[in-house]
Amino acid sequence: MNYKDVKIEVVFIGKPQWEAGWPYLGYDNNKTIDSIRKHLSEKFNKIEFNYSEIITTYDKELVNQIKTDIKAADGAIVFTIGHYGDPGIVQAGIEFIESKKPVILANYIYAGDHTFTKIFSSVKDKNYQLSILSSKNLEDFDRMFGNMFNLVRLRGKSVLVYAKDVIKMNWEVILGLFNPERMRIAKNHPEFLDQVGKMSNDEEFEFYTDTVGLDQAHQWRKDEALYKEILKNVFDIEMIRGDPEEILKYYNEVNTDQAKKIAQKWMENASLVEPTEKTILNSAKLYLAFKNILKDKDIDIFTPDCGTFLLCGAFPAYPCMAFFELSNEGKYGICESDMDSTISFLFGLYLTGRPGYVSNHTFDIKKNQITYMHCVAPCNLQGPEGPQAPYDIVYHGETHFLGASPRVKFPIGKPVTTIKISVFEKKISIRTGKIIDNIVDEKGCVSKMLVESDVEKIMENYDWDAFGWHRVTFIGDWKEDFINGAKILGLEIVEDDK
């Protein structure tokens, strides 16, 4: 959804001009209303605002009309600009919040405080899509308003998921992953090829994979129908299952000469290149295949079960460089068909304008450090206008001698905000930290962001069942924005470093 498509209902609750109360007897509400309208139109000129008639008593017809207008909008801002003790205006405010749309309850200090406090006290324990702010300066509300306007743009979005429900080993494709590196492996690690040969000749052998939701990345598999329902109700996002077989079809249709140019660009821009040119070429072909899939389906984010696909022969190349390149174009691939991480990524992307880093993490409790690590990270973690991250092209971490992965160098000294949303539990985990180093170590995933954080607190508060292992890290201090966004969506907030 573009900003021009966002529709916001703006509601005012106050007192009649000549009633005794706050701000004072004879106060002209129109002065405040006009200043708000002017500010919103200047600050957020792409948003469509609909302004309702001010509520100064419980007028049932007017209240019902405003409720109808809120339901037709993407969200609402309810300003409390006065009070005089009439419980009807409080009741009207409660009903507006009960609309099941994102609402910001915004209070002018020394004006609507009584009304504001009573409304919020009545609804604060009911898990509505509600964020609140009280200030005497209109500019203080802008950040929260911007958070809402950015988040409601998620409405109607689709996420493409590629995942297999039945696993069948395709050894022809699996062994094809080895071919570009076979000579190096045979020279340096012949036992590796011997073992793979034995496994490929064993008709009963298959790697462990998850198709029922036991893996922390596959929460949605526990009850796919319920997951999709919650996803639609809370985020208005649709999860679409794609046919994994079509990936190979698109891959085989790619123009190899075009892929060679992309592979050459990657190698020229990298500080270090480990894999063979053929391995990198195959990743470039997979990038073009993904790009064409997303174009044909008119989707800009997808999450294939890449680990499973590599282990069973559904991927002809490693996807890490493909995801890296797609992020340059505002298209995103999220690893491991992890829908919770994908939703967390989108939540952060729309609030910050920056892609996040989906990763595993390790804890050094002694040093109070976290290593966020995966085999891919976006190249533009500081936003489309920010500096591009320098990178090496190295072998994939876990498979060690195969594939091509970008080892991204993260900006040392920058603050980070790390989140994870549990769709099933309607919760968000939030923690902060600061990047202190880039780690190079052959064990585990290749990109390793070392972060200083309150590790002991995080361990004390860790909830694997809700949030699993993956986290999504955004460069910058976005804690306030993520808390605002969570409240606007009605998510329970868990600050796991507190």
Image (spheres, grey):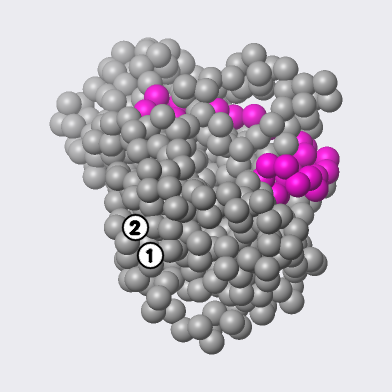
For the residue pair 98 and 464, the one nearer the viewer reads as 464
Residue 130 in the image: state x and y as whole percent: 42, 28
The residue carrying pointer 2 sits among few (fewer than 14), some (14 to 19) or many (20 or more) residues within 10 Å by Cα, namely some
- Closest to the observer, 445 or 65: 445
Question: As rendered, which of 365 and 454 lies closer to the eye?
Answer: 365
Asked if the residue under mark 1 is in contact with the one under mark 2, i.e. CB atoms within 8 Å, the reply is: yes
Query: Which residue is found at the position 24% from the left and 22% from the top?
Result: 58
The image quarter containing residue 218 is top left
Residue 278: x and y, percent?
Answer: 61, 74
Q: Left or right: 40 with respect to 100?
A: right
- Per the rendering, the mark at residue 247 is 1
Say if the magenta span includes residue 445. Answer: yes
Marks 2 and 1, how far apart in space? Answer: 6 Å
Identify the secondary structure beneath mark 2: loop
Q: Main secondary structure of the magenta part?
A: strand
Horizontally, is 325 left or right of 174 in the view?
right
The residue at which mark 2 appears reads as 244
Magenta highlight range:
422-451
